[in-house]
Amino acid sequence: TSSTMTALARGDGWLHAAADLTPAYGDDAPASKVQREVVFIEPDVLVVFDRVDSDANTSQAWSLLSPLSPSIDGNRAALVGAAHRLDVERILPAGASFGVTSMAGLDGDFHGGYRLEDTTSGGATRWLHVLALDGAVTSASASGEAGVALQLADGRTATVTFGADATGGHLTISGGSPSADVGLAAGVQTLPE
């Protein structure tokens, strides 16, 4: 089974990509929809939106592997290294909770590292996370049903919205250069090499 790239588009200072990962889970999986959509705002911000539909009696987990142990403060996690910091903020779903698992000895494939997990109960869940390097986002807040409003450290503001049930949405970046006001749609562009 193979997943399908459903969107790929690039503009001045941003990139949008989406994939339907449902086939990777197989026909008998408790998940009936697994889709990921991302918007990269250059140079240091990644907005990740996941649509996951699973049986109600299951649990769902959003995870990020790292060699660093994250510190958690409510809906935020920070991974701090010697030279850089990655901040992860959950916008959706409101009822999820972060946890950390040491990978050392957990599986023969891992000899160290950590897994940041955001968990919630099964059902139709929409996950929205903002990942920012070195303080690139000074504030993030929910915008509409499936979106986020960002204040960027360089003085710009950005709003990213997604379709709750299908690929697409809107990206607005203002207050500096580069700026954008563009619809995010299904369709794969050929990008320059």
Image (spheres, rainbow, N blue to C red):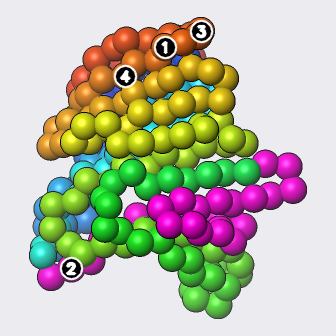
Query: In the rendered structure, which amino acid carries the disc numbered 4?
Result: Leu
Query: In the rendered structure, which amino acid carries the disc numbered 1?
Result: Ser
Q: Residue furthest bottom?
A: 105
Q: Is residue 69 left or right of residue 1?
A: right
- Residue 29 visible somewhere in the drawing: no
Query: In the rendered structure, which amino acid carries the disc numbered 3?
Result: Ser
Looking at the rendered image, the disc whose residue lies closer to the viewer, 1 or 4, is 1
The residue carrying mark 4 is 171
What secondary structure is found at the residue carrying circle 3? loop
Q: Position of residue 185 (x, y in %)?
A: 25, 23
Residue 129 position (above or below residue 27): above
What secondary structure is found at the residue carrying circle 4? strand
The residue carrying mark 2 is 58
> Which of the marked residues, 3 or 4, is nearer the chain's N terminus?
4
The one nearer the camera, 75 or 102, is 75
Image quarter of the N terminus: bottom left
Disc 1 and disc 3: Cα gap in Å?
8 Å
Image quarter of the C terminus: top right
The residue carrying mark 3 is 177
Find out whether residue 60 is within the magenta segment: yes
User: Residue at horizontal 47%, vertical 62%?
Assistant: 75
User: Residue at horizontal 13%, vertical 73%?
Assistant: 55
Q: Is residue 32 left or right of residue 68?
A: left
The one nearer the camera, 9 or 183, is 183
Estimate how packed mark 3 is, as few (under 14), some (14 to 19) or many (20 or more) residues with alpha carbons within 10 Å.
Answer: few
Query: In the rendered structure, which amino acid carries the disc numbered 2?
Result: Thr
> Which of the marked residues, 2 or 1, is nearer the chain's N terminus?
2
Answer with the quarter of the image where residue 123 lies: bottom left
User: Residue at horizontal 21%, vertical 79%?
Assistant: 58
- Residue 148 visible somewhere in the drawing: yes
Residue 174, numbered label: 1
Disc 2 and disc 1: Cα gap in Å?
41 Å
